[in-house]
Amino acid sequence: MQKGCKSILYQGATGSGKTALTAHMLHSAASRGMRSIFIVHRRELIKQSIDAFNKEGLRHGVIGAGFFEERSHLVQIAGVQTLARRISRLAQPHLIVWDEAHHLAAQSWDNIYGRFGCFHIGLTATPERLDGKGLSKYFQALVTGPSVQTLTQQGWLSPYRYYAPSKIDVSKLHIRMGDYEKTELENTVDRPSITGNAITHYQRLCPGRRAIAFCVSIQHSQHVVEEFNRNGINAAHVDGETSVAERDAIIERFKRGDIKILSNVELFGEGFDVPGIEAAILLRATASLGYYLQQVGRALRPFEGKDFALIQDHVGNYERHGLPDDDRQWSLAGRDERTRKEGGLGTIVRLCPKCFAAQQPGADACKFCGTPFPYQPREIKEVEGELQEIQRDNIRRMRRREQGMTETLSDLIALGKARGYKSPYWWAKMVFNARQARRIGKVA
C-alpha cells in the first residue's frame, strides 16, 4: 500500500485467523480516522465478525438484514447483498476488505467493487475463482500467508488423518462453471452403498465425534441424515432455505454435542467457524480445488482435547486435489486451462490397502496402521542395439528436452521413475514448483 498498490489479495489457509487479522487491521485504520467496510456474504459470517471485532475492542456498525444500522462508526461490517441495496446511503470509504474474495466475479460483488475507488484488500484461502480462473482483474498483488504445514507445526491448525474408503467414477460427468453438473453428480453419489459406507466408517473411525457432512443437493443431504438417524446417530440437515431461527438452533445443538452429524449443502464450506468440529465427511465430489480446500479446512481448527481432525473422503477428492497440507503455488493468473479441466494438480497420494488412510508416498508402510505397502520391482528389459559414443552435452540436451515435454506433475513423476530416481516424487515436485515460480514471475 505504501508503494502505491491499491488492491491486494491476501491468501491465508482456512482457520488461520483472517477475520482476527482484519479486526486488528481495521482497528489501526480507525485510529487514524479512516472509514472502512468489511464485506462478508453470509449471515453467520456477520455474527462471527461481530464477535471477532468485539474481542478486539473495535467499535463498529452492521449493514445487514435484521441488524440495527449505525452508520456513524468508522468501521462497518456489511453483508454483500444488503450493501448492494443500500450502497447509495454510504459515505466514501478509504478501505474495503473483502472476505472470501474469490467470489468477486459475481455481479453484486463486482458492482460494489467498481463503485468505490479506494484501497481494496481481498481475503481468501484459495486465491482463484471456484473454476480455477485467476483474480488479476481485481487485484494487483498477491501476498501469501504461512502454509498449512507451518500452521499445523506451530499449533494454529490441527493435525489430521485422511481416510478414503471408497470413491466414485466421475469420468462421464460434465463440468459446468468449474464443477461437476449437479444433477449428474447427485445421481452418482446419492446411493445407499455410499451413504452406508460413510456410516460404517464413521462408527469405526470416529464414533461420537461431531462431523460436518458435505452433500450435493437438499434431497441428498436429507437422505444422508435419515440414514445416520436410522443407525442411532443424531444428525440434522441445514441449507440456504432453512429458516434463520431453525438454523441457529441446529447449529447451537451441534456445538453442544447434542447433534453429532451436521449435513449441509453449500452452506458451511466457507467461513463457518466452529472449533468443535472433529471430522469432515466428504460426500460431494468436486472439480474445484477451492471448494475442496474449504471443505476439509472446516475440520482443521484446533481446540482443547482435540488430538487430530479426521477426514472421510468417499468420493475420491484426494485423487483430484491431493492432501490438505500439500504445498501449492498460487498466482493471480489462476491455473492454466488444462489443469482446470483436470480439476487439480495431479498430486500423487498413497492409499493404505487395509485401513484406507491417504498419505504422501515414500514410506514402506502405512503410518497409521503399520500395514506394509506392496512392493512392485521395476521390470528391466534387454533389447538389442548398437553401442555408440554419446557426448555428455548431448545427454544433457536430450534430458532437458525430455523434461520439457512433460506438462503435469504426474508426467514429471513418471519421468523420474523411468530414470530410476531414488525419490521421483520429490524431484518432480521441485521441478514443478520451479516452473510455477517462473510463470508467476513472468505474470508479475
Image (cartoon, rainbow, N blue to C red):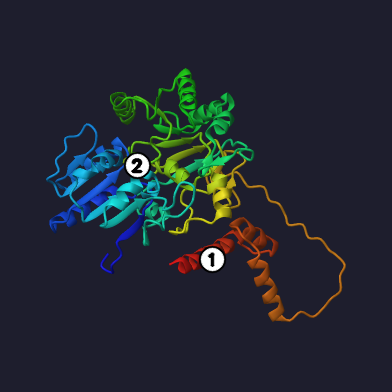
The answer to whether the residues at label 1 and label 2 have Cβ atoms under 8 Å apart is no
Provide the secondary structure element on which disc 2 rests: loop
Q: Quadrant of the N terminus?
A: bottom left
Q: Say if 153 sits above or below 399 in the image.
A: above
Q: Say if 218 sits above or below 309 in the image.
A: above
- Is residue 123 something one can see in this rendering? yes
Toward the viewer: 400 or 323?
400
What residue would you read off at disc 1? 435
- In the current view of this chain or complex, which residue is farthest to the top? 230
Q: Residue at x 42, y 33 (%)?
A: 212
Q: Residues within 10 Å of mark 1 (few under 14, many from 20)?
A: few
Q: Position of residue 326 (x, y in %)?
A: 49, 53
- Horizontal relation, residue 275 to residue 436: left or right: left
- In the current view of this chain or complex, which residue is farthest to the front? 88
- Horizontal relation, residue 300 to residue 292: left or right: left
Q: Position of residue 164 (x, y in %)?
A: 55, 39
Q: Quadrant of the C terminus?
A: bottom left
Number of marks in the rendered image: 2
Q: Amino acid at mark 1?
A: Arg
Between marks 1 and 2, how big is the CA–CA gap? 32 Å
Q: Position of residue 62 (x, y in %)?
A: 20, 40
What residue would you read off at disc 2? 271
Q: Residues within 10 Å of mark 2 (few under 14, many from 20)?
A: many
Toward the viewer: 22 or 93?
93
Which mark is drawn over residue 403? none
